[in-house]
Image (tube, helix red, strand yellow):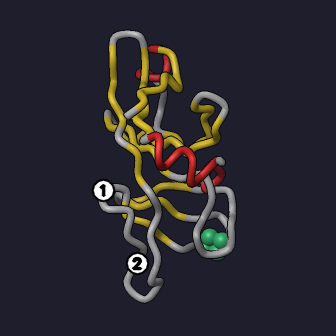
Amino acid sequence: MNWVKVFGKEILQANDFVRFADAAGRKICVIKVGEEFFATQPYCPHAGAALGYGTCKEGKLICPYHRYEYDLRTGRGNPGQGDYIDLYPVEVREDGLYVGLKESLLKRLFG
Ligand code: FES
């Protein structure tokens, strides 16, 4: 597992958000809900929309295109969608937010 710093400690005080982040040159989606952070794949599995422009409601990431919803704890799409998103582990450290990316996953996603 490679732990990559994606934001400095200032992000810990930010209001809730859904946005893209750069993880060592690779785009990911980061979500803040209250005191919790989540990290997901950057694009929607339905038709490739940019999840970093999505919204979050009741623990679900909502795609900006067709409003498919994905559970932030399991990655599963709503019943009937038949799809899921990859989630990456996050860790809050003294100097900011880190995301854990497996080497095999990095190769699969980003070549
Ligand atoms: S592209 Fe995300 S729901 Fe269609």
Q: Amino acid at mark 1?
A: Arg
Q: Which mark is residue 6?
A: none
Q: Residue at x 52, y 22 (%)?
A: 7
Q: Residue at x 69, y 64 (%)?
A: 49
- Residue placed under numbered mark 1 in the picture: 73
Q: Is residue 27 above or below residue 86?
A: above
Measured from the top left, where is residue 28 in percent x and y?
57, 43
Q: Amino acid at mark 2?
A: Asn
- Residue 8 appears in the picture as rendered: yes
| Category of crowding for the residue at label 2, using alpha-carbon neighbours closer than 10 angstroms: few (below 14), some (14–19), many (at least 20) | some
Q: Residue at x 43, y 59 (%)?
A: 57
Measured from the top left, where is residue 26 in percent x and y?
64, 38
The disc, 2 or 1, on the residue closer to the chain's N-terminal end is 1
Q: Is residue 15 above or below residue 81?
A: above
SS for dot 2: loop
Q: Is residue 45 above or below residue 8?
A: below
- Residue 66 appears in the picture as rendered: no
SS for dot 1: loop
Report the side of 106 relative to 65 (left or right). Answer: left
Q: Is residue 60 above or below residue 32?
A: below
Q: Residue at x 62, y 32 (%)?
A: 22
Measured from the top left, where is residue 42 in percent x and y?
60, 52
- Residue placed under numbered mark 2 in the picture: 78
Label 2 and label 1: CA atoms lie apart by 13 Å
Asked whether the beta carbons under mark 2 and mark 1 sit within 8 Å of each other, the answer is: no
Label 2 CB, ligand 1: below 8 Å?
no
Classify residue 59 by image quadrant. Answer: bottom left
Q: Quadrant of the N terminus?
A: top left
Measured from the top left, where is residue 67 in percent x and y?
58, 72
Report the side of 85 relative to 1 (left or right). Answer: right
